[in-house]
Image (tube, rainbow, N blue to C red):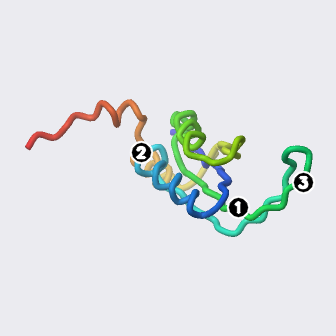
Amino acid sequence: MKCCFIYITTAHVRQARRIGKALVGSRLAACVNILVGMNSLYWWEGKIQDDREAVLIAKTRRTLVTALINKVKAMHSYTCPCIVALPIIDGNPDYLKWIQSETRSPEKIKNKPKKRS
């Protein structure tokens, strides 16, 4: 079972919450953490930028990384958002199993049988 942390920077906490809720709600992530008040220094359009951002850390399966990246890019305000996958090489086996059990591929969610009344 291969899991990843997905590190995402966002313009502000509202954007981080909106993206985080969408990722967890769609089962692309089992959990997200939002870190507020990060200061970022970076090159953009030939100048050094100095901005406040929020960080979103999502926990997911390796097989869902591409779908997660596509979802974030569709919702993000940045032209080139930071979305990077970091492999989890070891950890609490129970927690890693939990990540696996709480995430679903988009195909399985769409094709989930409907309950009958």
**Which amino acid type is shown beneath numbered disc 1?**
Glu
Mark 2 vs mark 1, CA separation in Å: 24 Å
* Location of residue 70 in the rendering, given as x and y in whole percent from the top left corner: 56, 36
State left or right for residue 36 relative to residue 111. Answer: right
Q: Residue at the spot x=87%, y=49% of the render? A: 43
Q: Residue at the spot x=50%, y=50% of the render? A: 96
**Which amino acid type is shown beneath numbered disc 2?**
Ser
The numbered disc on residue 26 is 2
Mark 2 vs mark 3, CA separation in Å: 36 Å
Q: Secondary structure at mark 2?
A: loop
Q: How many marks?
A: 3
**Which amino acid type is shown beneath numbered disc 3?**
Ile
- Quadrant of the rendered structure where residue 41 is? bottom right
Residue closer to the observer: 48 or 106: 48
**Quarter of the figure that contains the C terminus:** top left
Q: Residue at the spot x=46%, y=50% of the render? A: 22
Mark 1 vs mark 3, CA separation in Å: 15 Å
Residue closer to the observer: 99 or 8: 8
* Location of residue 55 in the rendering, given as x and y in whole percent from the top left corner: 65, 59
State left or right for residue 73 relative to residue 31. Answer: right
| Between marks 2 and 3 in the image, the one whose residue lies nearer the viewer | 3
Residue closer to the observer: 103 or 73: 73
> Which of pointers 2 and 3 lies earlier in the amino acid sequence?
2
Q: Secondary structure at mark 1?
A: strand
The numbered disc on residue 48 is 3
Q: Which residue is mark 1?
A: 53
Pointer 3 local density, CA inside 10 Å: few below 14, some 14–19, many at least 20:
few
The numbered disc on residue 114 is none
* Location of residue 61 in the rendering, given as x and y in whole percent from the top left corner: 52, 41
| Between marks 2 and 1 in the image, the one whose residue lies nearer the viewer | 1
* Location of residue 26 in the rendering, given as x and y in whole percent from the top left corner: 41, 45
